[in-house]
Image: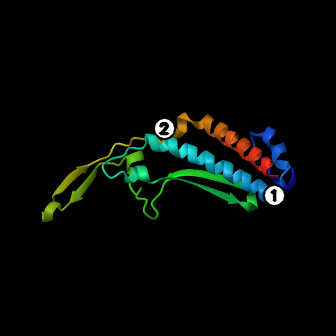
Amino acid sequence: MTDGVKLTGLEDVNSALEGFEKKIRKKVLKKAMGKSAADIRKVVKTHTPKGATKNLFKSVTSKVWIIAQKNLVKGAVFYSRKGNKKGFHANWIEYGTNERFVSNYRGHEGVSVSVGSITGQGNALRVFKTSSGKQISTFKKFLIAAIEAQKAKN
């Protein structure tokens, strides 16, 4: 295959991608990965607790990168903390915390008070583990659709 581009596990799609020039191939792969990540993002959102402020729910984000040096397209779904996204507490909800103590409670020397712990819910991990085989098939479905749309344009 030209330019070293190869999709592992999707050999039947490789021949269809060979017909495109490098720039178009990257565009098709990025579009398919973006739609696939958005699809997984929707599933993660349905399993994310909303709470009173819905900050964690609103912070579920997907992103796609192209790493040209390695001919790699990466997609990720994560809890964002940038801009108006307020997913700072995602790790606490996902993995939990140990019991925490406040020392010198209310100015009293030597007094430690437990403020409790958070039990992790593992929502995102559970979604990824239960849908691990579906992620490849979802990407393949969107990739085939993107290839067909690109062929229709040409």
Of the residues shown, which amino acid type is indicated by label 1? Answer: Lys
Left or right: residue 99 compared with residue 94 = left
Measuring from the top left, give residue 23's x and y in whole percent: 78, 60
Residue located 40% across and 51% down the image:
56
Q: Of tags 1 and 2, which is closer to the observer?
A: 1
The answer to whether residue 104 is seen in the rendering is yes
User: As displayed, is residue 96 above or below residue 12?
Assistant: below
- The answer to which of marks 1 and 2 sits earlier in the sequence is 1
Measuring from the top left, give residue 51's x and y in whole percent: 33, 47
Secondary structure beneath label 1: helix
* C-alpha separation, residue under disc 1 versus residue under disc 2: 37 Å
Of the residues shown, which amino acid type is indicated by label 2? Answer: Arg
**Residue corresponding to mark 2:** 126
Q: Which mark is residue 85?
A: none
**Residue corresponding to mark 1:** 22
- Mark 1 neighbour density, 10 Å: few (under 14) some (14–19) many (20 or more): some
Measuring from the top left, give residue 45's x and y in whole percent: 46, 44
